[in-house]
Structure formats: structure tokens, C-alpha cells
Image (cartoon, rainbow, N blue to C red):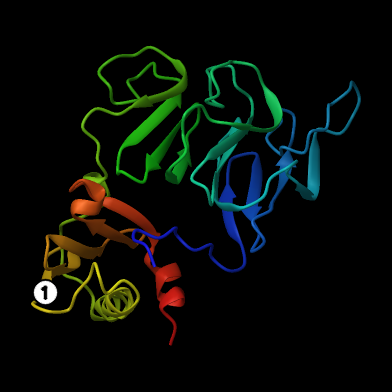
């Protein structure tokens, strides 16, 4: 098996709630949304006409959506990360919110320009940011208050890189690792050692607790770790990520992947 692997799709639902609508990723990778559809946020491709209902109180299928791993819903738009690492968005795009190089609205998913290795995404009120497999962060949409973190306040309808962000901000370094979290982390570490023995050779390994995260170091400068605060993710650091912190997704999903 090759490393790093794709983050496995969680079983059941992965949900995203916004002020006006809600979306869920099914275990099949399809997406369903419900709520307000006046801005195209449900992604069902239906064109509203005068006098028509502007909401759906039952889930509707997002047109053409498949192989999604996560979804994030904002007030005006919705975006999803696919298993391929591509990102798709739909809805209102007046500030370039859909990230495909245009301010044209779309009531069906459109591909975000140039993103092929996304791992997680967050849609804000009028801007969106994605974390890439390299740990880099890119944003698009409204930037009037410097939401992009790139030193300027100009809007962009295509992804713009955040200066100096390589994923390190996702690690919270305060506090002590709870014992239950350490148990889950060590279970995933042991699974990685069995499955990817060429990378995570147990010879000379050390297991230690550092304030803020659980980490295991291996020969050749490879590291696996989890954070202890907020939503817990699994991370890799080493030569295979050009020594940048690589977010591999939710630890809870990797615990399931590791098996009993």
C-alpha cells in the first residue's frame, strides 16, 4: 500500500448546517440538501420562476454530486470535497464564492479552479477556504477584511494562497492528551505500522506524549500525531510531505479503518 492514503469516507452521514439550509454526504458519496434554495444553495439544478416555492422541506439530490467525502454550507453557497481531492461549489457567487473564476451563480456544482488535492473545506458568510494535502490553505470570495490572509483586501473568484499556512495552525499545543484519545491514537499508529511497514518501521520507534498532541516518531524522519483539542485529526510529517504537516482527516474515521 502507498502512503499517504486517501482519507476513507465516513459511514453514514456527514452533515453541514448553515443559517438557511442543511446538506449531508451519504455513505454512497452522494449529497442531499434541504432548506432555502433561492440562491441555488441546494444544488438541485431547478430554475426558480415567479411564484414558485423558494424552499424545500425534504432532502433533494444535489445534481451530479458523487464521491464526496465532506461538505460545508454557508449562507449563500455550499462546497464539497471529493475523494479525488477536487472541490465543487454551488449557489450564489456575487463575490466569487464558487471559486471557478466567475461571479456567475450556479444551481449545480461547479469545479473550483486548480484544486485537485483538497482534504477539508470551510464555507464562511461570503468567503471559502480549503486545506490542501500539502497543508497549504487557499481561499476565495469576499476579502474586504483580509479574510484570505495574504496581505491584501482584493476579492478573488479563484483560489488564493494564504501566506505561510502549511497546516501547523490546526495543531493545538496546550493541555495534556486524554488517556482515551491516546488509546485511539496508538491503535491507529499500530495499524499504520502494519499496513505501511516500509514507511513506519517499528525498529527504533518511540511513543511519547507531548503537551497538546500524541506523536510517534519513526526512522527516516517520519512522524504520526493527533491533536488533543477541538476536532481530532490524524497528521503526518516527514519526507513524503516535504516536511510540512499533512492533515489526513478525522481520527475517528481512521479508528474505524484500523478495525477492532
Residue 201 or residue 237, whichever sits in front? 201
Query: In the current view of this chain or complex, which residue is farthest to the bottom?
Result: 260
Rendered location of residue 70, percent (x, y): 53, 51
Rendered location of residue 88, percent (x, y): 58, 37
Left or right of 214: which side holds 72? right
**Badge count:** 1
Which quarter of the image is occupied by the C terminus? bottom left
Which quarter of the image is occupied by the N terminus? bottom left
Residue 44 or residue 222, whichever sits in front? 222
Left or right of 144: which side holds 64? right
- Residue 151: image quadrant is top left
The structure residue drawn at horizontal position 35% and vertical position 75%, both measured from the top left corner, is 195
Query: In the current view of this chain or complex, which residue is farthest to the top?
Result: 154
- Count residues near mark 1 (Cα–Cα under 10 Å), then give few for <14, some for 14-19, many for 20+: few
Q: Circle 1 sits in a helix, a strand or a loop, which is it?
A: strand
Up the image or down, 134 lies above or below 155; here it is below
Up the image or down, 111 lies above or below 144; here it is below
Up the image or down, 79 lies above or below 127; here it is below
Left or right of 101: which side holds 200? left
Rendered location of residue 99, percent (x, y): 52, 25
The structure residue drawn at horizontal position 15% and vertical position 59%, both measured from the top left corner, is 174
**Residue that label 1 marks:** 208
Left or right of 54: which side holds 29? left
The structure residue drawn at horizontal position 26% and vertical position 58%, both measured from the top left corner, is 236
The structure residue drawn at horizontal position 37% and vertical position 42%, both measured from the top left corner, is 132
Rendered location of residue 146, percent (x, y): 32, 21
Amino acid at each position: 500500500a502507498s502512503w499517504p492514503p486517501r482519507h476513507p469516507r465516513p459511514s453514514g452521514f456527514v452533515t453541514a448546517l448553515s443559517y438557511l439550509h442543511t446538506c449531508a454526504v451519504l455513505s454512497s458519496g452522494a449529497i442531499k440538501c434541504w432548506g432555502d434554495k433561492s440562491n441555488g444553495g441546494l444544488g438541485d439544478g431547478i430554475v426558480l420562476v415567479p411564484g414558485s416555492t423558494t424552499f424545500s422541506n425534504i432532502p433533494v439530490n444535489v445534481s451530479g454530486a458523487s464521491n464526496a467525502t465532506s461538505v460545508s454550507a454557508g449562507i449563500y453557497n455550499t462546497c464539497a470535497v471529493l475523494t479525488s481531492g477536487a472541490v465543487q461549489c454551488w449557489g450564489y457567487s456575487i463575490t466569487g464564492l464558487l471559486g471557478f473564476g466567475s461571479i456567475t451563480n450556479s444551481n449545480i456544482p461547479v469545479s473550483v479552479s486548480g484544486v485537485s488535492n483538497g482534504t477539508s473545506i470551510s464555507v464562511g458568510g461570503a468567503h471559502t477556504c480549503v486545506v490542501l494535502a500539502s497543508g497549504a490553505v487557499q481561499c476565495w470570495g469576499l476579502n474586504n477584511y483580509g479574510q484570505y490572509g495574504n496581505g491584501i483586501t482584493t476579492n478573488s473568484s479563484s483560489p488564493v494562497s494564504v501566506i505561510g499556512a502549511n497546516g501547523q495552525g490546526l495543531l493545538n499545543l496546550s493541555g495534556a492528551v486524554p488517556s482515551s484519545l491516546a488509546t485511539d491514537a496508538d491503535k491507529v499508529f499500530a495499524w499504520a505500522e502494519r499496513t505501511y511497514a516500509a514507511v513506519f518501521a517499528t525498529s527504533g520507534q518511540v511513543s511519547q506524549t507531548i503537551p497538546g498532541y500524541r506523536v510517534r516518531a519513526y526512522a527516516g524522519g517520519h512522524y504520526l500525531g493527533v491533536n488533543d483539542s477541538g476536532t481530532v485529526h490524524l497528521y503526518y510529517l516527514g519526507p513524503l510531505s516535504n516536511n510540512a504537516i499533512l492533515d489526513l482527516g478525522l481520527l475517528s474515521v481512521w479508528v474505524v479503518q484500523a478495525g477492532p
